[in-house]
Image: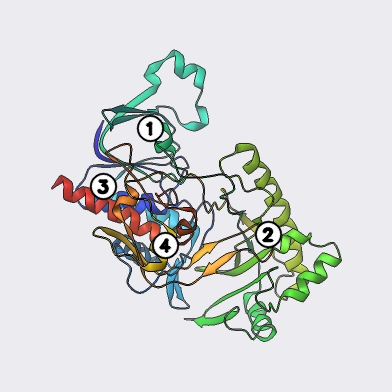
Amino acid sequence: MKYDVIVVGGGTAGCAAAYTAGMLGLKTLLIEKNIHLGGTITSALVVPAMKSGEHQINTDFYKTLISELHAMKGQATYQKNPGWFNPELTKIALDRLMERAKVDVFFDTHIRDVIIDNKLIKGILISKEMLSVYNDKIENRNKDLLVYIEAKYVIDATGNCEIGKLCGCEFLEEKNENQPVSLRFMMGGVNVPLFASWLKDYDKDRDVTTVEDIDGFIHLSTAYTWDKGTKWALAPLFEDAVSKGILKDHDRNYFQIFTVAGMPSTIAFNCPRIIDYTETLDVANMSKALQLGRKCIYRLAEFCRIYFPGFENAYISNIADMLGIRVSRRIKGKYIYTIDDVKNGKIFKNPVVVSNYPVDVHSDKKDSSTLFKVKDYQLPLESLMSADIDNLFVAGRCISADFMSQGALRVQASCFSMGEGISKYIANLSA
């Protein structure tokens, strides 16, 4: 098999890259380790896609996805942000878009090796068998179980830069440059009108709590953290729950909830934020994070049933299939983007992202998280190019950026732009 572009990783950046490449006439293969596309949106339940300014570029794919989901009643525009998506319908919408762009998609696929010659990826080896029946010993005895696929260009959108790792690329991460992970969940069976009415009266701070009726559908959001920088209306409820043993103290370090497009009796949770385990590249560490996260979810659900009117008959309806990881492996690219570039709004010859999303770095300690607003900044294409492999690009959280600047660029809107921008560049090279 031969392709112009192989995209590895079918999350936000990978889907944007694959769809754009396909629509521009490039023969494209998208390889995904799970059984559906969407990554953080679908598997990790990370909604909404955060708004990132009025001057974004490379937004064709994002706008197409919004339109597709809107037609499926799986999208809403709330607080002037059109990125409120239904995670389940997003799986279907992305399948439709890849079919429309004539992108080949391999699900449940394991990459075994990368063939490199003279600083170029010539192709990749994948397992012929699905992951569910994959066996190392059988494969080692029978090379017929491996499939070789040639590619002119490879885009690593795996999040952890797994292709870059197989290629032996240099990375930028350093010890103690971590952020807590989250394990999101949803509760169904919520009497949303009752809860919305109570919430709107209980918290008058419209910078924290909002409730809107949009075409007969109630949308709401609210938040609380244990940080003292904001006077949180929900604080007394959490403090009472901790004093009574309903919650543990660390359960309340970060709490955010909101409605979901097309799910009128469901509330989504951007929590728990797991502060005890932050080494995202360590299997044992992240396994413990998952176990702790599910314990926290059970306690938070019970807290909501006790303290929130409208949650009396609510139940846990969905727990994310993957952790929400904010930072992990970062490749060394042809340009290393820095926090000074963000703060100074540095202009580049080949920008792929324009954003004003704030520098957002979570901490595992009280009153230590970073969130400061900035003006428009640009990310250059060179930060998405491997410094070691000439036809390898990266998109998503694994870009060539220092720790603090990556905290501004890791959000979905910017990842959409990264993937789209890379494929437009490749299409121009191939013309």
**Mark with earlier residue (2, 3):** 3
* Residue under pointer 2: 365
* Residue under pointer 4: 340
**Mark with earlier residue (4, 2):** 4
**Mark with earlier residue (2, 1):** 1
Residue 95 visible in the picture: no
Q: Residues within 10 Å of mark 2 (few under 14, many from 20)?
A: few
The x and y percentages for residue 93 are: 39, 57
Instruction: Describe the element under mark 4 as helix, strand or loop.
Output: helix
Residues 377 and 122: in front is: 377
Mark 2: amino acid: Lys
Q: Residues within 10 Å of mark 1 (few under 14, many from 20)?
A: some
* Residue under pointer 1: 167
Instruction: Describe the element under mark 1 as helix, strand or loop.
Output: loop
**Mark with earlier residue (1, 4):** 1
Mark 4: amino acid: Asp
Identify the residue at image location x=68%, y=77%: 232
* Residue under pointer 3: 102
The x and y percentages for residue 388 are: 33, 37
Q: CA distance from mark 4 to mark 2?
A: 25 Å
